[in-house]
Every structure is written in C-alpha cells, then in structure tokens.
Image (spheres, grey):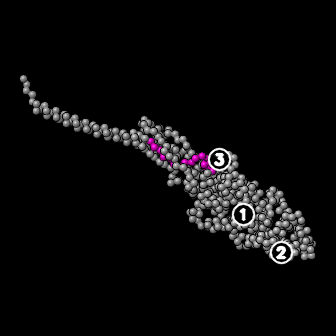
Amino acid sequence: MRRINKRDRTKHGSASVFLSLILSALILVECTFVAFVWNLDYALSVNTALKTQIDSILSDYNRQLFEVYGIYAFTKDEIDDECFYKALESNGLESGSTLFVTSRSRFTADDLKKAINSYYWYRGTGISVKSVVEDYSQLILGLDESGVLAKVGEFMESPAAGYLSDIIKGSETAEEWIGKAGDVLNLEDLLEEAADMDSISADYKEAIKDFDIDIDIDIAEWEALLDTMSDLENVMDQLTDMSDPVMTKLSVAHYCSHNFDCCFSPEGDSSITGTEFKAIHGDKKYDSEYIITGIEGLPGAFVVEYFMSRILIVSNILKDYADEKFRNTMEVLGEIISAIILVVSEGAADIDPRLIAAGLTYFCAVVQSLKDLIMIVQGKSVVIFEYEDTEIITFDYRDFLNLFCLLVPEEDLLERSHEILKRDYGKLYKGVTLEADFRGNRYTLEKSYQLYE
C-alpha cells in the first residue's frame, strides 16, 4: 500500500485557497471599477444630454422679438425632451433617466434695460439719440434770450388779456373797435392795421372751425405751459453730459418712442428695423402713448396731444418773435389796441403796448399751433424753429414722443414697455434649469442668455 504524504497535500491546497481569495478580491475590485466607469460614462452622457437640451431651448428664441427689439427670450411654456433622449441614444445608451424642468428665469424690466443698451451699442452711429435734446435746448435758449415769455406772463395777468380776447373772438370788426376810440384814433390812417387785426381774428375762427373745439385765451392754461417749460428745462440740464446713466436714459427714451406702435403715425412709419407694427399685433395700438402716460387707449393719446400743443405754442412764439416784420406789426397793433382799451375802459386800464404786442404774439402762436397739430395728426412734420426762411428744427410725431419720454422716469418707461412685450409675445423667459435623475442621483444644469448676465 502506497503511503500518502499529508503534509504535501496540505501545502498545495493552501496555495489554491490563497490564490482564490486574491483573485476573488481582484475580480471584485475590477468589477467595481468597471461599474464606476460605466456609471461615470453614463453620468457624463446625461450631462451632455442636458447641455444639448438646454442649448436647444435657448436657441429657439423668438426671432421677431430679437430682430425688432433686440431681445433674446423664448416663450415656450411646454418644453419637449426629444433632444435629451436623442443625445443619450447617440451615445449608445438606453434612457434610464427622467428629465425635469425645475424652473424658468423670467425676462424682467431690468433685463429689458440691458437689452436696450446692447441694442444701441451697434445702432448708435445710425440713430442720433441726442438730436431731440439738442434741438429743444436751442429752442429753450432762444426763448430765454428773447424774454418774450416773461412779457406774455405779465400780459396774461393784466386786464388786457380779456379785452384782447374779445377783440379777436368777438363778432365786431377791427373798424368797429377802432370806432369805439372816438377821436383818439383815425380809421383812415389805420386801414392796414385794421386789416391785420381782422386777419388774426379770421385765422382764429378758421382754426377753431377746422379743429372743432373752442379755445378762450383767458383760460389758455398759461401756468401749465410754464410748468411744461420748467420741466423740460430741468431735463435738458440733466442731459448735457455723456455719462453712462444719461446715455442709457436717452437710449431708453428713443427706444420707447420709436420702436412701439403709436396713434398718429408719421408717413412711412415703422419700427427702427423697418418692421411694420401690424405684423406684430395686427390692429393699431397706442403703445408709445401708454408708455409715456400710463393711460391706455385714446385717453392716453389725448394727454400726449395736449402736451404736444403746449410745445407747439412755445415754438411758434419763438418763430414769430424771430421774424422782424411780424414783430414790428405786433408792436404797431399793440399801440393801437392799448389806445382802444384805454378809451373803452374809461381810463381804468392803461396797458403797456409792449405787453399787448407779446399777448398778440402768444395768441397768434396758439392759433398756429392748432394748424401744426392738425398736420402732425395727419402724419406730417412741422417746423419748430426757422430763421430767415431757413428751417432750423423740424419735428414729427415720433420726435415729440421722444421728447416726452425724457420727462418720464426711466423705471416707468421700462415697466410699461415690458407689459406691452408680454401682451404681444406672451410670457418671456431668459433662462431655464433642467434636472435628470439616474440611480438615485440628480444632475442639474442652469443656463441663460449671456446678454443678461
């Protein structure tokens, strides 16, 4: 019988067990490493899919909104997940994740301000946003130098205002008024001046007939006109430098006055980029007027129209005062009417003829402003200031809107413009946050347009 060496058998068996333990541990490590790499690869694929999906969402911005208003924003309330799952499949992976849209970043009025600054950054060379300010500054300077407004103010506070209103508006002719002066005035020597007085009265009646309203010089809102001048003068003083806040204000004002629909559109009117407003919202809207006044519809347009009439009165005062022939005529008529008033009032109202001349200038400016207002309503431009038959400054309706926007706080302009954009395009978003889950882990990606960062 063969004898078995138990010691040798034990030695070889121990080695096998040892190797088995080592290999099993190695296999476990390798499997764990493979699983980790596989999970990491899937996680990278999920992140890539998230990036593809979010880029797809942001690239689907509203093209018209960008072309007309310079705004990057998307309007989708429901976001599909096709790109996400297609990106996973392109990497040879089956979908084991669920996509969630956890939040969307709303487009705000502050974002609109950033968009406007960017919008004018490359359009500034083609759009003179300071032209209206510079033009109106010349108008204010001219009025200050002439001193005519101060004289008109004194006239409005004197008894002459009522008498002059009766002379211009009444049914009696200039000949009859001169006749009331008795022996003080000789009609035969004043035929030309009488014709001038009748001409002013006829212009008044014609303007009232065309405009279908009645205006009394005694209630011509003189204080409101002075307040308007004061407000504009303060704004012009603030806009004399070229600092960033001032340039932003000018850009916002021009943007709101020229890039939204309005009531009395100038001829060939469209957005800055040439887009017709009916292509945006169909029917005519009074958007620029709402942005300025905060009042919707025709009432807002009437407020703007009333404000515009004040500016036209002031501009016509300056135009007429700069005309030497007109100024001389008013001075002569001032002396005649002063004599008439002295007689009619039985010596109670001895008015300086220069004040009456200023009052006549103001009255003529009121009548002329009505005619100018009709032209603007018809979509035409009017001359704000001319000298020696040369047109120095001309305004159309958009130019007036631009001027009025300068008087409105920037925050109000932006908020109201933002409301109009939401009305025309719906809820606007500038960014989105996406999440996907995989084996209990959450992968998150947030992104918005760089313009607003």
Q: Position of residue 292 (x, y in %)?
A: 66, 57
Q: Is residue 148 left or right of residue 433?
A: right
Can you identify the residue that label 1 sits on?
A: 311
Closer to the camera in the image, 42 or 302: 302
Q: Relative to 6, does residue 259 appear above or below in the rendering?
A: below
Can you identify the residue that label 3 sits on?
A: 280
Can you identify the residue that label 2 sits on?
A: 349
Q: Residues within 10 Å of mark 2 (few under 14, many from 20)?
A: some
Q: Is residue 89 left or right of residue 358?
A: left
Instruction: Give the residue type that dot 1 points to.
Output: Ile
Q: Position of residue 161 (x, y in %)?
A: 80, 69
Q: Residues within 10 Å of mark 3 (few under 14, many from 20)?
A: some
Tell me which label, 1 or 2, sits earlier in the chain: 1
Q: Residues within 10 Å of mark 1 (few under 14, many from 20)?
A: some
Q: Is residue 176 left or right of residue 423?
A: right
**Tags 3 and 2 touching, CB below 8 Å:** no
Q: Position of residue 435 (x, y in %)?
A: 45, 43
- Place residue 251 in its image quadrant: bottom right
Instruction: Give the residue type that dot 2 points to.
Output: Ala
- Place residue 360 in its image quadrant: bottom right
Instruction: Give the residue type that dot 3 points to.
Output: Ile
Q: Position of residue 85 (x, y in %)?
A: 47, 38
Closer to the camera in the image, 366 or 68: 366
